[in-house]
Image (tube, rainbow, N blue to C red):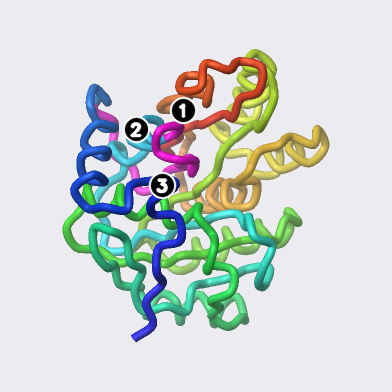
């Protein structure tokens, strides 16, 4: 039994079960009811910064047997596409099993092997799991970290996921603009979000690359947008937008957070 231990419990979110449960409860306070979907984009900063925005995405997420969680790579370690080789992922709220059947199907289609290296210190998948544990009782996950940034390869991953059917939901983990003044960050982010809402995976990718936008989530967001386009979704919808300035009060250097659902 290979268990992936938490790497950011005690820093990005509380390491103690009761404290974590209490914080999650507070993050959902006053979050309005959302139209349900199986595909969402969720931020991955510390809960005090982006947890409220994340709650909007999880409020919209419908119950599923399996949640595929796509993330960027912050560590730069491991292969271009890395599917976790663990049997379970652990958080202070307990262990969550991996969907090994779906993993084997996806590994075969991508022609890669499962990998542990990319997941050792990567926080952007781990942060999603306690939210899922709060919302749902019994489910599996499939954690995938994507370092690949070429559009053609990301498009291919989205198409392959679409070929595997619809017996799972997908979470794309991504933060938006980093370390820009609030007004500039918000403008750039909303321009990029309009591409996502239009299911224009290529347009979103081109905008981020050509304008050198500091959006941390280019790869998972591109893959999910392509998947939604391929599987008959009509649009993306911005559910909530915020920046780190809400918590820090610093409007000169912010990070943008967006909750986006697909319908």
Mark 2 lies on residue: 56
Depth-wise, is mark 2 or mark 1 nearer the camera?
Answer: 2
Residue 256 pos. (x, y %): 57, 29
Above-or-below relation of 193 to 16:
above
Left or right of 224? Residue 78 is right
Q: Which residue is nearer to you in this view: 136 or 86?
A: 86
Please tell me which of labels 2 and 1 falls first in the chain.
2
Q: Which residue is nearer to you in this view: 23 or 207?
A: 23
Q: Which residue is nearer to you in this view: 139 or 199?
A: 139
Quadrant of the image occupied by residue 56:
top left
Secondary element under disc 2, as helix, strand or loop, is helix
Which numbered disc covers residue 157?
A: none
Above-or-below relation of 233 to 239:
below
Instruction: Give the magenta range.
Output: 33-50
Mark 3 lies on residue: 39
Viewport quadrant of the C terminus:
top left
Residue 2 pos. (x, y %): 39, 82
Mark 1 lies on residue: 238
* CA distance for labels 2 and 1: 10 Å
Left or right of 7? Residue 130 is left
On whether residue 42 falls in the magenta region, the answer is: yes
Residue located at (60% from left, 15% from top)? 251
């Amino acid at each position: 039994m290979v268990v992936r231990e938490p790497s950011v419990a005690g820093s990005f979110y509380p390491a103690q079960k009761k404290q974590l449960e209490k914080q999650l409860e507070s993050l959902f306070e006053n979050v309005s009811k959302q139209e349900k979907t199986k595909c969402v984009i969720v931020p991955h900063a510390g809960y005090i910064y982006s947890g409220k925005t994340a709650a909007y995405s999880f409020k919209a997420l419908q119950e599923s047997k399996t949640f595929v969680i796509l993330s960027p790579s912050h560590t730069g370690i491991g292969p271009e596409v890395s599917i976790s080789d663990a049997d379970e992922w652990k958080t202070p709220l307990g262990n969550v099993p991996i969907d090994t059947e779906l993993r084997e199907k996806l590994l075969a289609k991508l022609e890669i092997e499962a990998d542990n290296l990319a997941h050792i210190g990567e926080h952007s998948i781990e942060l999603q799991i306690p939210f899922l544990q709060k919302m749902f009782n019994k489910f599996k996950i499939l954690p995938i970290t994507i370092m690949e940034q070429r559009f053609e390869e990301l498009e291919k991953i989205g198409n392959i996921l679409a070929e595997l059917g619809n017996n799972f939901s997908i979470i794309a983990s991504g933060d938006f603009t980093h370390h820009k003044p609030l007004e500039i960050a918000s403008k750039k982010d909303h321009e990029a979000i309009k591409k996502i809402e239009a299911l224009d995976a290529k347009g979103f990718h081109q905008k981020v690359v050509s304008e050198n936008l500091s959006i941390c989530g280019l790869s998972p967001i591109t893959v999910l947008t392509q998947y939604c386009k391929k599987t008959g979704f009509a649009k993306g919808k911005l559910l909530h937008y915020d920046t780190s300035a809400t918590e820090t009060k610093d409007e000169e250097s912010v990070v943008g957070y967006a909750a986006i659902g697909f319908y």
